[in-house]
Image (cartoon, helix red, strand yellow):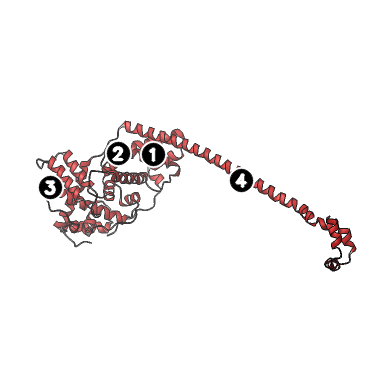
Amino acid sequence: MSSEPALPDVSGVDEELVTYMDGELDAENRFRVEKQLAADAAFRTRLRLLQRTWDALDVLGRADASEAFTRTTVEFVAVNTAQDVEHEKQRQVRKRLWSWIAWTACGVASAAAGFAVLTYVLSRPDRQLARDLPVIERVDEYRNADSLEFLKALDESGLFAAELENDEL
Amino acid sequence: MSVAQPQPQRYELQDPDVRLMLQVRDGGAVASSAAFEELVLRYQSRLITVLEHLVGNRELAEDLAQEVFLRVFRARKRYAPEARFSTWLFTIANNVASNALRSKSRRREVGVPDKINGSDTNPFGLDQMAKAASALMPTRALDKAESAQIVRLALEALNERQRLALLLSKFEGMSYQDIAQTMGLSVQAIKSLLSRARVNLERILTPYVEEGVRPDQAAPLSRGDESGPLPSESIS
């Protein structure tokens, strides 16, 4: 709205005369225009033409709104405002409902996440125990060996292969 | 050439309508409704006058005026007295009328044709004036209704912004500053807009007033003619 399209130029004289007629000139320019009007007949003619056009607009007249218009306007505003209030209430209800749904969903998701984390954390010692069960079952035997290297050497020599097969059978 | 600039003002102290609007904003239900009704009473005729001459239709102008008052009431909680009440009201009216004119021009099948090449004046508007004049002017003695029709058609030949600026100046007696605020333009732009509007109107109406020459008989205005013959170029 603020950009002015390129329009045909209006003379500085016309612009100044219109501004003068509208009482929008400052004192210095007003004085200068009045001096020019006193001295220049063509300038006065131009002012008169512009003034006549301005006065011609008087013929358009002014509207006179009826009392009925006032009444219908106030009623129109009241009805629309009541509808606005109703829409706002419905909007608030919808907002509260969605808010409740969102908070409930958040709660359920948080509970599920908490349960999963808790289950995982709590199950960790059991899983460790299950993984270490073969060692635990033979911990007494392992204690009799002096070193891990010695046991590995015995295993690699195949000394216990027959015994293991018998155990499996 | 310079235009006097107004000083900042406390509008709630100077403008009783601003105080009424503040009552609409802050008052209880009864006080608020009463203040609003008073504002409707004070401004309905003024608003319809400007809107009717802007959109060229009384019934549409009344509908738009009601829409403007509805927007005023809806905006009451956000209202801040940063201008005269009339300036604020006509700013809303400007928006409402602009929307209506845009819709109207989209729907329009017949009527005053649109501007050609963005020209300030509308040559087809002049043709229409001529048709109206030929039907209405068996002699040069125009009665008031006929004159009103000619002037109305001349007004319709102006573009929307020139027309609004002219109407606010003529019927509301608004200062350039207030018109600028209402239309969201600079004071300098309003000065140019009003000058163009007045000069264009003068060029359209003078042949009727002085010589009875119908516009379709007169030499058409060219864009070059729009600056017009100047009585004096000594002042700038």
Q: Earlier in the sequence, mark 2 or mark 3?
A: 2
Read off the chain for label 1: B
Whether label 4 touches label 1, CB < 8 Å: no
- Residue under disc 2 on the same chain as residue under disc 3: yes
The answer to which image quadrant residue B131 occupies is top left
Reading the image, the residue beneath label 4 is A106
Nearest to viewer (mark 4 / mark 3)? 4
The picture places residue A44, in percent across and down from the top left corner, at: 16, 54
Q: Secondary structure at mark 1?
A: helix
Q: What is the number of the mark on residue A111?
A: none
Q: Earlier in the sequence, mark 1 or mark 2?
A: 2
Q: What is the number of the mark on residue B70?
A: 1
A148 relative to B192, above or below: below
- Residue under disc 3 on the same chain as residue under disc 1: yes
- Residue under disc 4 on the same chain as residue under disc 3: no
**Crowd band around label 1 with a 10 angstrom C-alpha radius: few (<14), some (14–19), many (20+):** some
Read off the chain for label 3: B
> Does residue B45 appear in the picture of this structure?
no
Nearest to viewer (mark 4 / mark 2)? 4
Q: What kind of residue is marked 2? A: Leu
> Does residue A88 appear in the picture of this structure?
yes
Read off the chain for label 2: B
Reading the image, the residue beneath label 3 is B214
